Amino acid sequence: MSITLTIFIAILLISLGITYWAAKRTTTTSDFYAADSGLTAAQNGFALAGDWCSAAAFLGFTGLTALYGMDGAFYALGPLVAFCTVLFLIAEPLRNSGKYTLGDVIRSRMQTRTSLLAAITGTVIVNFAYLMPQMAGAGVLVRLLTGISYDWAVVFVGLSMIVYVAFGGMLATTWVQIVKAVLMLGAGAIMLLMALSLVHFDALTFFADDEAKYGAKYLLPGNYLKNPFDQISLGLGYTLGLAGLPHVMTRFYTVPDARAARRSVVWVMFLAGAFFAATTLFGLAAADFVGQDTIRAADKGGNLTLPLLAQYLGGGKGTFGGELMLGFVAAVAVATILAVVSALTLSTSSTIAHDFYVNWMKGGKVDGRREVRIARVTAVVIGLLAIALGILAQGINVAVLVILAICVAASANFPVLVLSLFWRRFNTGGVVGGMAMGLISSVVLAMIGPAMRGSDAVWPLVNPTIISLPLGFLGAVFGTLIAGRDLENEKRFDAFLLQVHTGIVPERSS
């Protein structure tokens, strides 16, 4: 335990040092929200990898693969497709049309307070849905690292997150993510080499051993996603949901131009893609070496699979090597979670302070320093709410919760964002209709489905994207048609489209 705590404290001190350094350089709104758009494509790519390789990737995907075989691999490999959507459809238009948030894009296109409020609602709900599993994963790991109770572990993570965001803003959050991404990729590479060395670098051995232990069905789909429509929903949620995640969108405002935004996505595709592919092998290796019974005994959701595999690879429980590997992997996983929850908290506080307070309530007439103060206070409140959500999420596999959050993003944010960028007739009624239908359908179906209610579910699909995504688009289209033509909005579309594709902001006619 002393080894584990030492590694954990060292990583925590590095993170706090970064926050102190960033706090001295964070004074303006641009500093706080977007690191003054001064990051390179490589830096932003590593930070995006840190954003996306979250508790779900590091813990949940590995656990799902170990317990359910190929269904877990579907969860792990889906992001490779998701970033293609971001690269070809979202990254450049977002960088050209926005300033700090999704609300900026909607406000720039619609120029109405009602549409801005709808965008704020979608952003806040998606971010809190994504925060819950991160906090749950953090609670499990910090409990493992320190021996304190789950509830107090969640409180500790929440307070650390508040410090990062409230004092360091986007600059601190970014560099914590970069450091965490390097540690995570390094830990993954070390574990992969150690695991493969035990089977003479023949990865097919894991498949053969698991098939012998758990039967041929283990390597077939349907162990977790028993309904084939769940598999389609998972693919849809991944392909379109990532592009609707607000904390991912905000990363494109931290680079100087659209070209750097595109290159950032290429970086993260290679970095995160390699790691996600490795999590499938980690899950298969854990099922082989550690065993499903041991994994379930440690955590019924499978969230401790990777630390248990690390302990085994280091020499087993009670050995110096085993405790060293366990401490290193668990501490890196905690750092992973801290970075992601910091990004989510910053995205939410930016939305509330910049979109709601400054633009919706005050019409943009707020001093920059006051806006930063409001954002910092908001970060504290959000951190406290995140602690409560993390306590409620105890025992649920974090990967499942993350995918449900992505489902909400795909069903609400994505239709509104895409139609705002590319449909001339789209109007405020469409923004409200799309957000309302997407949010209500995805949240309600998720709450009554197997992910939340288990065997008591009254809805058969773990992931409802296959229903809620079309409903989100239908709500947006019908809302647009019901609201009637907005000719002034349509006249502005050509200028908006020019800005989206080129970054050129046309001069407004007097």
Image (spheres, helix red, strand yellow):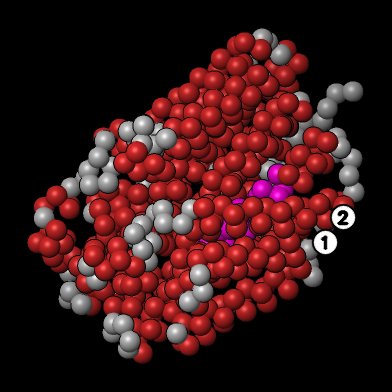
Location of residue 362 (image quadrant)? top right
Q: Looking at the picture, which amino acid does disc 1 mark?
A: Thr
Residue 427 forms part of the magenta stretch: no
Left or right: where does residue 156 sit relative to residue 395? right
Magenta-colored span: 336-351
Estimate how packed mark 1 is, as few (under 14), some (14 to 19) or many (20 or more) residues with alpha carbons within 10 Å: some
Residue 404 vs residue 93, the one in the foreground: 404
Q: Which residue corresponds to the image point at 24% horizontal and 71% vertical from the top-left?
A: 290
Residue 337 seen in the figure? yes
Residue 235 seen in the figure? no
Contact between labelled residues 2 and 1, with CB atoms less than 8 Å apart:
yes
| Residue under pointer 1 | 27
Q: Which residue corresponds to the image point at 17% horizontal and 53% vertical from the top-left?
A: 218
Quarter of the rendering occupied by the N terminus: bottom left
Residue 215 vs residue 146, the one in the foreground: 146
Picture coordinates of residue 300, whole percent (x, y): 34, 59
Mark 2, secondary structure of its residue = helix
Picture coordinates of residue 149, whole percent (x, y): 51, 70
**Does residue 324 sit above or below 65 in this rendering?**
below
The answer for how far apart the CA atoms under marks 1 and 2 are is 7 Å
Picture coordinates of residue 79, whole percent (x, y): 41, 49
Left or right: where does residue 121 sit relative to residue 4? right
Mark 1, secondary structure of its residue = loop
Picture coordinates of residue 452, whole percent (x, y): 42, 43
The mark found on residue 369 in the picture is: 2
Q: Which residue corresponds to the image point at 60% horizontal and 16% vertical from the top-left?
A: 479
Quarter of the rendering occupied by the C terminus: top right
